[in-house]
């Protein structure tokens, strides 16, 4: 499950229109798939640029766009975007600096 912050990053980057504060993963996938489908048709260069910025691996993109892919291209790319965002969240949590109470001593205002 994505936090509001991670969901807002996807909503902002892909210009998703929603009137909800929180979305389930299925709702987010459906909205993202619809937008990716539009971008494939009309803004492919911009979509590829976003995928590059999100650090989605090129070989995975190529597979999602290939005729042998299980899912339609828009669904495959939307799943890759969500998968990458989950990985980013997990990595941030794993390497988040842990601050001990003793470390904060002397920093009180």
Image: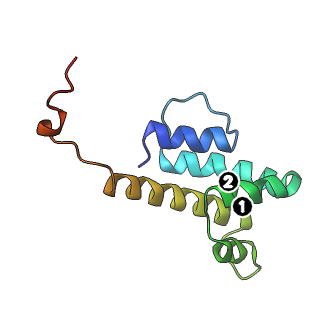
Display coloring = rainbow
**What is the total number of numbered labels drawn onto the structure image?**
2
Residue at the farthest top position: 109
Q: Is residue 16 left or right of residue 48?
A: left
Separation of residues labelled 1 and 2 (CA atoms): 5 Å
The residue at which mark 2 appears reads as 33
In the rendered view, would you say 30 is above or below 5? below
Along the line of sight, the residue nearer the viewer: 48 or 19: 48
* Residue 74: mark in rendering: 1
Residue in the picture at 50% in, 39% down: 23
Locate residue 53, reporting x and y percent.
66, 55
* Residue 109: mark in rendering: none
Classify the position of the C terminus by image quarter. Answer: top left
Residue in the picture at 51% in, 55% down: 85
Residue in the picture at 29% in, 48% down: 97
Locate residue 19, reporting x and y percent.
60, 27
Marks 1/2 in contact by CB < 8 Å: the verdict is yes
Is disc 1 surrounded by few (<14), some (14 to 19) or many (20+) residues within 10 Å?
many
For numbered disc 2, what is the local secondary structure?
A: helix
In the rendered view, would you say 106 is above or below 65? above
Locate residue 58, reporting x and y percent.
68, 72
Examine the image and state in which quarter residue 14 appears: top right
Examine the image and state in which quarter residue 67 appears: bottom right
Residue in the picture at 66% in, 43% down: 13
């Amino acid at each position: 499950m994505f936090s509001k912050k991670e969901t807002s990053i996807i909503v902002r980057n892909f210009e998703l229109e929603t009137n909800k504060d929180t979305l389930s993963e299925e709702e987010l996938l459906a909205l993202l798939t619809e937008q990716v489908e539009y971008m494939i048709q009309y803004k492919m260069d911009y979509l590829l640029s976003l995928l590059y910025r999100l650090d989605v691996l090129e070989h995975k993109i190529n597979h999602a766009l290939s005729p042998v892919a299980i899912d339609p291209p828009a669904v495959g790319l939307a799943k890759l975007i969500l998968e990458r965002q989950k990985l980013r969240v997990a990595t941030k949590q794993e390497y988040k600096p842990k601050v001990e109470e003793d470390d904060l001593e002397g920093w009180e205002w």
